[in-house]
């Protein structure tokens, strides 16, 4: 199967604001790709542009082999989209909502739909308006995957969901992923859930790509370093590749990208009074938080 | 629920952790020869991990003869009589590295640790 989503040099401006800045990435088939970034990093704008809800200012997106500007019924019938703030027909009951969605999709799978209804515990006779936020998100997911789309795009699906509902939501989503073609692109703040789920992580800041890597590779490429020193004097200027640098007493801590094999030797040279150097793999959460904090500190240095 | 203990922690690739969990389960008898083994989808849903990862692990275990697919039945565990010592020892490597690191923090050497382990083994055999 060809690459389901290809974004090439995408830029999106709203007036003078640049929301997405020369962004390029691919979403591989048969995998879960997590799209991470702080609030306002441009995740939703990118996703909405991919789905032709916005027109690119420049660059382009290709989805299932078609330019985003030319998406038609054939492609849309193979795409499932669920967003945190999507508008649902709140006056409809769950049953009515399903009847409403069904005719749009030739591949609608009644058996799968019923299975999801059972697993999600959705009451057919209840109006969407009267459902809790979690229930409503489950209804939206059902409406977005019951036709077994080839590409599922989820924009911040977990925000405001309690852990139990989040669990059900992910399990429901994972029902879809069978032997046949499937691809998931999911934007989220919920790094803990995504860390296990994702095969690949794309991290953006200020509309630009910062990281685009397979998860096992990512975990190998970032290490958390902790150095103990004999003196408590501030170290002063630190090398630029020490990400999210902190010091407290005799301990300094930072993240390092692509450490080479003789890292310890290099660090011992850089910190003359080091008495102990420890390194351990960083989790995706630590990488995400450190990179976000680093960026914020660059703009407004800590006093 | 999966028939063996998996406790996923951040910072290490999920596939590695899952493989380690499988071998631990074989070693401690949680999984035995001929036991049914869950499908890729069941593993993926239970642990909320990508099916790609679950598939990778299952394929790896099949390739090495730890699992067989039986048509109409599903997957089954094939336990070797006892893995070679080197393989079993490799399972202890992370714990050993951690122990060594902590010993270093206390200015103790690997030899000191070895003495400690021998003493522990001695006192264990004395009491039994």
Image (cartoon, coloured by chain):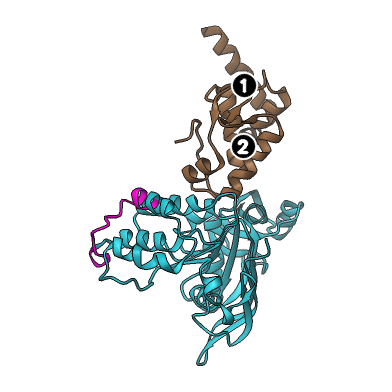
Q: Nearer the viewer, residue A163 or B39?
A: B39
Residue A252 versus residue B20 in the image, above or below: below
Residue span colored magenta? A116-130
Chain letter of disc 2 in the image:
B
**Residue at the spot 58% in from the left edge and 44% down from the top edge:** B54
Q: Which chain is cyan?
A: A
Where residue A129 sits, quadrant-wise, is: bottom left
Residue linked to disc 2: B19
Q: Nearer the viewer, mark 2 or mark 1?
A: 2
Residue A242 pos. (x, y %): 64, 64
Which color was chain B given? brown
Chain of the residue displaying label 1: B
Q: Which mark is residue B117?
A: 1
Q: Position of residue B46 (x, y in %)?
A: 47, 42
Q: Is residue A216 visible?
A: yes
Query: Is the N terminus of chain A in the top left, top right, bottom left or bottom right quadrant?
Result: bottom right
Find residue B79 and report its image quarter.
Answer: top right
Q: Residues within 10 Å of mark 1 (few under 14, many from 20)?
A: few
Marks 2, 1 in one chain = yes
Q: Position of residue A301 (x, y in %)?
A: 52, 76
Asked if residue A230 is among those painted magenta in the image, a careful observer would answer no
């Amino acid at each position: 199967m060809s690459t389901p989503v290809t974004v090439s040099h995408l830029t999106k401006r709203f007036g003078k604001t640049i929301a997405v800045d020369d962004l390029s990435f691919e979403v591989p088939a048969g995998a879960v790709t997590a799209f991470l970034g702080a609030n306002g990093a441009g995740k939703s704008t990118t996703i909405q542009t991919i789905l032709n809800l916005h027109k690119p200012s420049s660059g382009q997106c290709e989805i299932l082999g078609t330019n985003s500007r030319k998406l038609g019924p054939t492609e849309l019938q193979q795409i499932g989209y669920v967003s945190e703030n999507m508008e649902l027909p709140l006056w409809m009951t769950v049953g009515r909502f399903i009847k409403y969605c069904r005719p749009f999709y030739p591949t609608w799978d009644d058996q799968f739909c019923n299975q999801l209804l059972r697993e999600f515990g959705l009451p057919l006779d209840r109006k969407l308006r009267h459902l809790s936020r979690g229930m409503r998100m489950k209804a939206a997911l059902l409406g977005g995957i019951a036709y077994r789309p080839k590409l599922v795009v989820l924009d911040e699906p977990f925000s405001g969901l309690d852990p139990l509902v989040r669990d059900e939501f992910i399990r429901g989503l994972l029902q879809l992923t069978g032997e046949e073609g499937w691809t998931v692109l999911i934007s989220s703040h919920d790094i803990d859930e995504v860390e296990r789920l994702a095969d690949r992580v794309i991290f953006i800041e200020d509309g630009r790509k910062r990281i685009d890597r397979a998860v096992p590779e990512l975990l190998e490429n970032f290490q958390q370093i902790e150095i103990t020193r004999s003196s408590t004097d501030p170290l002063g200027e630190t090398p630029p590749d020490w990400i999210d640098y902190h010091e407290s007493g005799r301990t300094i801590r930072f993240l390092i990208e692509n450490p080479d094999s003789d890292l310890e030797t290099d660090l011992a040279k850089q910190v003359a009074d080091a008495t102990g150097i420890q390194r351990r793999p960083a989790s995706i959460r630590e990488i995400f938080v450190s990179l976000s904090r680093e960026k914020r500190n660059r703009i407004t240095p800590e006093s | 629920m999966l028939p063996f203990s998996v406790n996923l922690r951040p910072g290490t690739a999920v596939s590695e952790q899952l493989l380690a969990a499988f071998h631990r389960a074989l070693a401690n008898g949680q999984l035995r020869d001929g036991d049914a083994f869950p499908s890729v989808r069941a593993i993926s849903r239970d642990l909320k991990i990508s099916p790609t990862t679950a598939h990778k692990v299952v394929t790896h275990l099949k390739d090495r003869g730890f699992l067989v697919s039986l048509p109409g039945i599903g997957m089954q565990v094939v336990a070797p009589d006892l893995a070679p010592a080197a393989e079993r020892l490799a399972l202890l490597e992370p714990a050993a590295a951690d122990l060594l690191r902590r010993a270093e923090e206390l200015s103790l050497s690997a030899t000191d640790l070895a003495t400690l382990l021998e003493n522990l083994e001695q006192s264990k055999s004395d009491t039994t």
